[in-house]
Structure formats: C-alpha cells, structure tokens
Image (cartoon, rainbow, N blue to C red):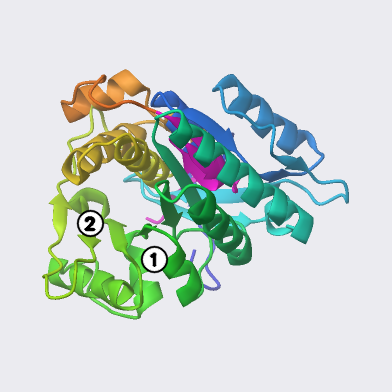
C-alpha cells in the first residue's frame, strides 16, 4: 500500500516458512547438495516450525543458534499482486541479534564446511545475504576465503535496503541483486526498462571492486557481468527467462531458487552459461507455486526444464549462514512468512 492507503485482501492470509537463508538452504538440498544452515532462531513456536521444515529437507542445523534472551524468530509479511509479484516487509528478530561469539561460530562453521568439501574433492559454495548484519557476512566471507580459497562466495543483496560497504563487495565472488535492489544500490534509473542501463549499473559495482554481478530481472531473465583482466572488455552473459511449466502464482522465493541453483551448479564445475540456465529453470518452477520454501523445485524438475543432464557435475556440500549451499554456507535468514493477496482495483 502507498502512504495513507488501505487495500482489501482477496484471499485469507496463509502462513509458510521462509527467509532467504532458509529458502536457499532448502533449495540447495532439493537440488542434490549437502546443505547446512547457520542461523539464529527464537525460542518460540515459529522457530520450531522453521527448524522442523528445514530438517525435513535434510538441512544440517547443528551450527545454528537458538536465542536465549527472548528475541523472537524473524518474520516477514508478503503481499502478492494478482500477477504473482511479491512485496515484502521483514522483521529480523533473532537473525538481527548476532553477538560477537555467534559471529565467530558462524565464520568457523562455514570455513570448516567449505574446507572439508574441497578436501573431499567436491565443490563448495557459501551463500550470504543481508537479512543478517553485514558485519556477520563480512566475517564469514573473510574466514572462508582464508580456509577455502576455491569456495564460491555469493552475496544476495536482498534483505537490507541501505548502501553496501566496499569491503563486503570485495570479499565475495558474486554480488546478486534483483533489478529493484540494483537501482536502489546504484542510484541509476531506467533499470526496469533498459537493458543497457542494467549493464551500466552492474558495471558501477564492478568498478567499486565486485568480481561479478548477477542481476535477476524477472520476466526479462538475468544477466551476469564479470570483471575481466586489465585491458579486456567486461562482456555481459544474458539468460532469458524460461517459460514456467504452469501459471505464475507467487514470485516470493524465485530469487532464492535462482541463486541457490546458480551456486550449486557453479561450485560443481558448471560453465556460467549452464549455471545460469539451471538457475532460470529453478526460478521458473518456483513462481508456479505459492509459499516460500514449499515452492522450491526438486532436482529432477529443475534439470528437466533446463534440459541439462543431472549427472553432469559432481555436487558437494552446502552450509548456510547468511545463505549457503553446495559446499558451504553460513546460513542466515530463517523466518516465518505470512502471505496475503491484495486487490488494487
């Protein structure tokens, strides 16, 4: 709703488990990776519900923390447009209350998981996002970089609508905003309608030190811009949106499905083009189902829509603390989401 505006809902609200870290951890597990989540939960019914859902997906929560000070589990309210577009309001709760000791444990857990996966000959990825404080993500990224230099570090820009520091941009391999987040982060306009503006905005993050920028553009697909060696031109890699297998119902977790699939495939040795295609397939499937975690695709579905062989790459393990997956992740965002359909007639 706009300021001073009240809208009527057209369907009863529904409750589902989600959160960026939780969604990406579950997505990685469904795609065949060993997945771990490092997160903070409240000691409440909502936290128990999220943990139960994650454990049912096979996500390892042994490094996660249950808050002892009465801070509730994070929650989000999601408003769905008739076309499936989602607008969210998130209250971080326990996931915003990281102590120095919690941060150290998260960094150690992510680094150990990534290093172990690489020693075993598998891929490793750590997915970070901004539903936890940036200082936590930065500590995790630096520790993982020291212990497992070949692990993929991906930062989901979503979760915090404020400028991002240069140290965090430089600490990760891939920065992943959607088009709205890219516009707010760079201050550049026309991103929603001009593909050249998207690339120009992504280039500003490259110029600030980002190694690669992965932008999701909804129905327009996605683009990956990678920093090249001095003297080489930065050439964008485009991936068109794949046709969803059914009608679009809810885009809430499509970005999480996309980023998880990209990280799983990339850390397992896929080319950037194949990783983008698998990611597009995962996102296309997710938008056809309501809910956050319930919408995430299974491995055979995603590979089938992408037209890729399931045994093409060797999968590793994933740990989430700020979102992680194929081999390591410092999981961060876990929350209960309340969804409501809105009517703006």
Q: Which mark is residue 181?
A: 1
Between 316 and 71, the one lying in front of the other is 316
Number of dots carrying numbers: 2
- Residue plotted at (32% across, 64% down): 211
Q: Main secondary structure of the magenta part?
A: strand
Does 209 sit above or below residue 160? Answer: below
- Residue plotted at (57% across, 46% down): 111
- Residue plotted at (39% across, 74% down): 184
Q: Position of residue 3 (x, y in %)?
A: 53, 73
Crowding at mark 2 (Cα within 10 Å: few <14, some 14-19, many 20+):
many
Q: CA distance from mark 2 to mark 1?
A: 15 Å
Between 42 and 142, the one lying in front of the other is 142
Q: Position of residue 15 (x, y in %)?
A: 60, 35
Asked if residue 129 can be seen in this view, the reply is no
Q: Which mark is residue 224?
A: 2
Between 318 and 13, the one lying in front of the other is 318
Between 74 and 327, the one lying in front of the other is 327
Q: Describe residue 28's horizontal placement relative to residue 335 as left or right.
A: left
Mark 1 secondary-structure assignment: helix
Q: Describe residue 238's horizontal placement relative to residue 310 as left or right.
A: left
**Occupied quadrant, residue 103:** bottom right
- Residue plotted at (30% across, 19% down): 300
Instruction: Mark 2 or mark 1: name the one nearer the start of the chain.
Output: 1
Asked if residue 222 can be seen in this view, the reply is yes
Q: Nearer the viewer, mark 2 or mark 1?
A: 2
Q: Position of residue 18 (x, y in %)?
A: 56, 40
Q: Describe residue 54's horizontal placement relative to residue 150 as left or right.
A: right
Does 209 sit above or below residue 341? Answer: below
Q: The C terminus lies in which quarter of the figure?
A: bottom left
Q: Which residues are magenta?
A: 316-345
């Amino acid at each position: 709703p706009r300021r001073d505006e009240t809208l009527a809902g057209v369907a009863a609200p529904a409750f589902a488990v989600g959160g960026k870290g939780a969604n990406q951890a579950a997505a990685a597990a469904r795609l065949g990776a060993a997945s771990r989540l490092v997160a903070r939960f409240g000691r409440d019914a909502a936290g128990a519900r999220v943990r139960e859902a994650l454990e049912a997906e096979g996500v390892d929560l042994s490094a996660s923390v249950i808050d002892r000070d009465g801070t509730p589990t994070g929650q989000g309210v999601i408003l769905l447009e008739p076309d499936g577009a989602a607008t969210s309001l998130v209250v971080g709760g326990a996931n915003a209350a990281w102590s120095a000791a919690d941060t150290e444990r998260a960094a150690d857990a992510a680094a150990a998981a990534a290093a172990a996966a690489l020693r075993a000959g598998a891929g490793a990825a750590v997915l970070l996002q901004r539903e936890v404080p940036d200082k936590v993500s930065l500590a995790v990224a630096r520790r993982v970089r020291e212990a497992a230099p070949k692990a993929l570090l991906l930062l989901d820009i979503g979760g915090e609508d404020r400028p991002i520091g240069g140290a965090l941009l430089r600490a990760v391999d891939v920065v992943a905003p959607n088009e709205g987040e890219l516009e707010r982060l760079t201050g550049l306009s026309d991103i929603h309608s001009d593909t050249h503006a998207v690339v120009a905005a992504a280039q500003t993050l490259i110029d600030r030190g980002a190694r690669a920028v992965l932008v999701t553009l909804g129905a327009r697909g996605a683009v990956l811009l990678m920093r090249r060696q001095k003297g080489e031109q930065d050439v964008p890699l485009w991936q068109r949106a794949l046709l969803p297998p059914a009608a679009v119902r809810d885009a809430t977790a499509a970005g999480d499905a996309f980023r998880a699939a990209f990280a799983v495939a990339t850390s397992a040795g896929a080319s950037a083009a194949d990783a983008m295609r698998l990611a597009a397939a995962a996102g296309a499937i997710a938008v056809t189902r309501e809910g956050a975690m319930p919408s995430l695709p299974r491995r055979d579905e995603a590979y089938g829509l992408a037209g890729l062989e399931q045994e093409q790459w060797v999968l590793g393990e994933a740990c989430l603390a700020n979102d992680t997956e194929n081999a390591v992740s410092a999981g961060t965002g876990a929350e209960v989401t309340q969804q409501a359909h809105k009517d703006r007639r």
